[in-house]
């Protein structure tokens, strides 16, 4: 069993992402930092804090898939300390709180940008459970034209969470196996997926099982949207693994075998009708343009952070 810091952290991040979604994971990390700063018994001057953040940053960079939003937050905190060498731990804590507020506003803006899709009565498909999808459903509870929801069932725990949210919101909903979508596909107007990131290969990284569904939906001409704010864009240019993989020992009818499990699916950006972001709903071409523009600012921050390593 792997017990080093990297594999343990990688597995933990993947599990938390699967359980609550990427955005909730990012917010929990920031909250944990505040608690750690309060309880940490070592040096808490700006230089010492910067070193601790750099160590965490480098660990997160090595994880697969990269949790871009969490790394961006760490980088933001590091740039803050670089620009304020006299900052103390209380100032950093206050900045973390401001960063949480900024992230919350970004989510609110993203969800508001999704609402125009529901001006008319729609029949929609959802598959993944996350904090973002949960919040979207909470918004749609009060829509004038509340959508009829089809749930592509997958992992029992995730599906039951979606069902609970839909019941609470008094939606009309139907549940079917994710591999049975072909039987209702002609009823659908659109599908919405939560996502982890958009990477430098113009790929959307999202929950397992999403890829097969999206392929069917695209073939049928159904509109497909991903909720993906700009802070989740992964701007690194180097090639890395797109998912965390794990080999598990299994046995069936007396035959032992190895089963490889992947944490996420990988879908080309062009398979999506639109990317619901904090600025607007981007077409794939618009998402590429914004990605390239934002990448330039990211590269400058990376240069500053790389200078800390030296």
Image (cartoon, grey):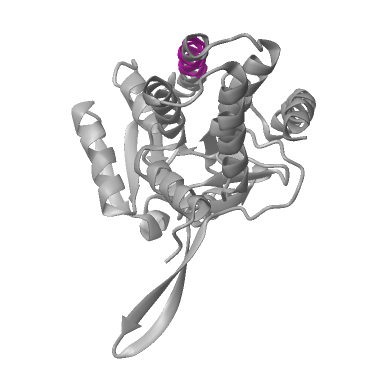
Residue 274: within the magenta?
A: no
Residue projecting furthest to the bottom? 254
* Residue 277 appears in view: no
Quadrant where the N terminus sits is bottom left
Residue 76 rendering spot, x and y as whole percentages: 62, 21
Occupied quadrant, residue 72: top right
Q: Does residue 82 lie above or below 199 as drawn?
A: above
Q: Position of residue 83 (x, y in %)?
A: 70, 12
Report the span colored magenta: 94-106
Count of numbered marks = 0
Horizontal relation, residue 81 to residue 298: left or right = left
Please identify the quarter of the rendering in which residue 305 is found.
Answer: top right
> Residue at coordinates 52% horizontally, 51% vertically from top-left?
6
7 is higher (above) or lower (below) than 173: below
**Magenta residues, dominant SS class:** helix
Q: Position of residue 206 (x, y in %)?
A: 51, 46
Q: Residue at x 58, y 24 (%)?
A: 48
Q: Residue at x 53, y 11 (%)?
A: 88
């Amino acid at each position: 069993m792997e017990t080093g810091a990297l594999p343990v952290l990688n597995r933990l991040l993947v599990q938390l992402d699967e359980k609550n979604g990427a955005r909730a994971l990012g917010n929990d990390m920031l909250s944990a930092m505040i608690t750690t700063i309060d309880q940490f018994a070592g040096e808490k001057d700006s230089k010492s804090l910067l070193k601790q953040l750099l160590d965490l940053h480098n660990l997160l960079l090595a994880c697969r898939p990269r949790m871009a939003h969490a790394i961006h937050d760490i980088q933001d905190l590091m740039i803050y300390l670089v620009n304020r060498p006299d900052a103390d731990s209380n100032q950093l804590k206050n900045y973390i709180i401001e960063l949480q507020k900024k992230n919350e506003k970004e989510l609110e803006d993203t969800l508001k940008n999704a609402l125009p899709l529901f001006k008319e009565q729609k029949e929609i498909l959802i598959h993944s459970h996350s904090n973002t999808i949960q919040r979207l459903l909470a918004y749609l509870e009060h829509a004038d034209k509340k959508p009829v929801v089809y749930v592509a069932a997958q992992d029992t725990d995730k599906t039951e969470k979606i069902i609970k949210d839909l019941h609470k919101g008094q939606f009309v909903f139907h549940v079917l196996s994710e591999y049975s979508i072909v039987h209702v596909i002609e009823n659908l107007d659109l599908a919405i997926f939560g996502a982890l990131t958009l990477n430098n290969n113009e790929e959307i990284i999202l929950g397992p099982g999403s890829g097969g569904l999206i392929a069917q939906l695209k073939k049928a001409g159904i509109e497909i949207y991903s909720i993906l704010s700009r802070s989740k864009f992964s701007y690194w240019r180097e090639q890395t693994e797109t998912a965390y993989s794990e080999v598990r020992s299994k046995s069936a009818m007396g035959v032992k075998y190895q089963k490889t499990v992947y944490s996420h699916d990988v879908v080309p950006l062009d398979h999506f009708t639109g990317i619901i972001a904090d600025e607007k709903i981007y077409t794939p071409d618009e998402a590429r343009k914004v990605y390239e523009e934002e990448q330039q600012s990211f590269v400058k921050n990376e240069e500053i952070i790389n200078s800390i390593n030296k």
